[in-house]
Image (cartoon, helix red, strand yellow):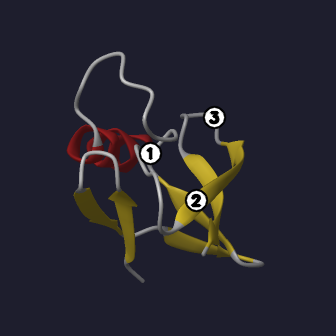
Amino acid sequence: MKILLTNNFHDTEVYISPNPIGNGEYKVSRRAAKRARSVLCGIAGCTCGDTFGARGGHYLEIINQTWNHDYIVRVQP
């Protein structure tokens, strides 16, 4: 599964591939989250997007974090 995240402020987009863990929840690695953030909004101190840098379009709702800071998320349309 690939999810297209967009940032309509900077007009950028990135695909991420979260790993399904059941019950409609997915795991996104910390590395993938940092990569998405840098692609969608690489400007230090900018507050245009969420944790993943997304603004507009699909939204990943963070439910929890694992011991190594990976994210447990739900996909919101």
The residue beneath circle 1 is 52
Sequence-earlier tag: 2 or 1 = 1
Distance Cα–Cα, label 3 vs label 2 = 19 Å
Residue shown at the point (78%, 78%) measured from the top left:
23
Give neighbour class at mark 3: few <14, some 14-19, many 20+ (Cα, 10 Å).
few
Residue shown at the point (25%, 38%) measured from the top left:
38
Q: Is residue 11 left or right of residue 25?
A: left
Sequence-earlier tag: 3 or 2 = 2
Q: Nearer the viewer, mark 1 or mark 3?
A: 1
Tell me which amino acid carries mark 1: Phe
- Residue 48 vs residue 17, the one in the foreground: 48
Q: Quadrant of the N terminus?
A: bottom left
Residue 12 location (% of width, % of height): 23, 55
Residue 25, compared with residue 51, is above or below; it is below
Tell me which amino acid carries mark 2: Leu
SS state under label 3: loop
The residue beneath circle 3 is 67
Residue 40 location (% of width, % of height): 28, 47
The residue beneath circle 2 is 60
